[in-house]
Amino acid sequence: MAVGIICEFNPFHNGHKYLIQRAKALTNEPVVVVMSSSFTQRGEVVITDKFTRAKSALLGGADLVIELPVVYAVSNAEVFAKSGVKILSSFKELTHLAFGCENNDIELLNQAVSAHKNTAVQALVAEKMQDGSYYPKALETAVREIYGDNTANILATPNNVLAVEYLKALPDNILPLPIQREGVQHDSHSTANGFASASYIREMLKKGKSITEFVPYEPSELAFPENLEISLLYKLRSMSAEDFANLPDVNEGLENRIFSAVHEYNSVNEILFAVKSKRYTLARLRRILIFALLGITKEIQNIEPSYARVLGFTKEGAKILKSCNLPIITSVKKGLLLGGNIEKLLKKEVFATDVFALAQKPPKKCGSDFTTPIIKI
């Protein structure tokens, strides 16, 4: 038996260690982690490479770390959650999905799931979006009007939004295990008792400050989004409006706004703020630019998760791995020979890892997906 966690660990900090240990304490089961690879849901390169983060997770109590392919890791909450759950549910031994949230009241979380499916809510959402609102805010407002503040407040915080998407995606044979977030809020700039948000820790790393107080294992080699600025601008300038239209999350003529901004401004931030509106948030636009950089199209993101790529494991994790009913990838070179959708997804993964290497200082060479061994603890 095992409990799963879907995560980014960007970087792995004390709050993540608490989540893993709490999940183990509540279930008395080993932990399987499905972790984003080289880019994040917010449309940024990760602060340190996936192998370092996988090792940190294993040292922090995880037993098996599986890669969440980049085509799903850089996506909206629904795709991120659904894809992670799909990979985890391929492990026949999995009994629970644990997730950190601001409110772990399962009744309220389930009420928010029901609100998502309510036709009156969706009609009101459509009405509000016609007035220029973006979907998450329109949904929260519609739920507030129909269900009241308690349910709507669930949809007002990032971790709870993901929690609702996990519940929507969970099969009947896997039980939800919501765990109350400890320490500080998501994206908070305050600290408490050795806890700090991942965004605050990344800011400290960027400034060269020590983060020892907030992480069990401090990363040494770092990557930052601004190091990809020129590469991203080059890619954007090489694309047509039609190319932009083929990217996930691009619709309703957004491709034309992006194309115009790309040819009018000479920095990524200027492009983002030129296109940003009530309907198109910065997070969504950052994701779109990363889709462009990596060549992630709607077609490839619509491919179902087709394999479980192993980043690291303990002895207990090796046992769990045997229960997986997806093809298990322990060698990218051999995985590419399997062809079909596995080859398509893995090629995109290899490219994303090589682009990530450009965000490090100094830039690293290509090929770490082929040369870095699986982490064994």
Image (spheres, grey):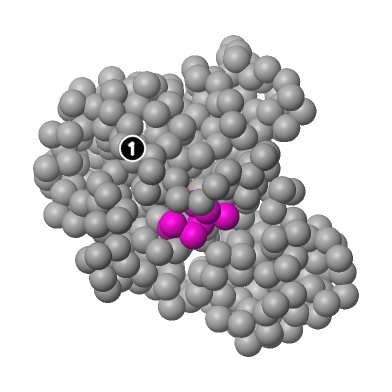
Q: Is residue 195 above or below residue 306?
A: above
Amino acid at the residue labelled 1: Pro
Q: Is residue 255 above or below residue 63?
A: below
Q: Is residue 58 above or below residue 2?
A: above
Residue 371 drawn in magenta: no
Residue at image point 40% right, 48% down: 369
Q: How many marks?
A: 1
Dominant secondary structure of the residues highlighted in magenta in the image: helix
Figure quadrant of residue 288 = bottom right
Residue 354 drawn in magenta: yes
Figure quadrant of residue 4 = top left
Provide the residue designation for mark 1: 373
Q: Can residue 177 be seen at all in this image of the molecule? A: no
Q: Is residue 343 left or right of residue 363?
A: left
What is the span of residues highlighted in magenta in the rendered image? 349-355
Q: Is residue 90 left or right of residue 170?
A: left
Q: Nearer the viewer, residue 249 or 45?
A: 45
Bin the neighbour count of mark 1 within 10 Å (Cα to Cα): few under 14, some 14-19, many 20 and up: few
Q: Nearer the viewer, residue 196 or 178?
A: 196
Q: Nearer the viewer, residue 155 or 44?
A: 44
